[in-house]
Amino acid sequence: MDVSQPPRRYNDKRKEYLEWNDYFMATAVLSAKRSKDPVTQVGACIVDQKNRVVAIGYNGFPRNCSDDEFPWGKSDAKQSLEHKYMYVVHAEANAILNSNCTSLDGTRLFTTLFPCNECAKLIIQSGIQQIYFISDKYEGHTATIASKRMLDAAGVLYSRHVPKQQKILIDFAEFLDEN
Ligand SMILES: [Zn+2]
């Protein structure tokens, strides 16, 4: 037995574990990676009061509306039939619509981008209480101002997520038996 080394203690918990909010935001970020939108990938994750993930979503076309047939472009006017705006379901809306629980009352929403006014309506009506976001890049745009106006009126809290860990690496090889 090597006495120069202190005995390894398995009773102590790992120090570098993910804290809850980083974990939930990372889930939103991972969901965003499913998006086929060539310009903006957004992910959302909804969590209940027991820290259970009850919904995730990303921006995409409705079910059975093929990513290969519908346009992902936005070069034409917003009202054009060839503008993605006509067809895309936002990440927050997808999360709300695909949640696996009957009520989202009192839940928290983690989203990579500040919700637009249309999503704010759904957020308020579904009972989501708090929003954490990373980017607010459309701050100052009419849709964002309208969104904040409604969220403020409805008492839905929102704040920028400040990550404890700047980077989280996913390395599948780490979990291979050979390592
Ligand atoms: Zn939206």
Image (spheres, rainbow, N blue to C red):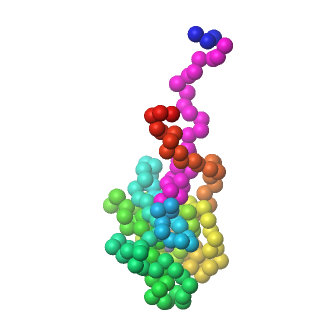
Q: Name the residue at 52% across, 66% down.
A: 42
81 left or right, relative to 113: left
Viewer-nearest residue: 39 or 129? 39
Does residue 74 belong to the magenta stretch?
no
The relative height of residue 90 versus residue 3 in the rendered view (above or below) is below
136 left or right, relative to 64: right
Does residue 9 belong to the magenta stretch?
yes
Residue 179 x %, y %? 51, 33
Q: Quadrant of the N terminus?
A: top right
Viewer-nearest residue: 13 or 84? 84
Would residue 130 be seen by someone viewing this image from the given angle? no
Looking at the rendered structure, the number of numbered marks drawn on it comes to: 0
In the displayed orientation, state which residue is furthest to the front: 178
The relative height of residue 19 versus residue 178 in the rendered view (above or below) is below
Would residue 49 be seen by someone viewing this image from the given angle? yes
Residue 132 x %, y %? 56, 60
Residue 175 x %, y %? 48, 39
Residue 100 x %, y %? 34, 58
Viewer-nearest residue: 64 or 7? 64
Q: Name the residue at 56% across, 72% down.
A: 39
Give the residues in magenta: 4-31
Q: Name the residue at 49% across, 54% down.
A: 27
The relative height of residue 54 versus residue 124 in the rendered view (above or below) is above
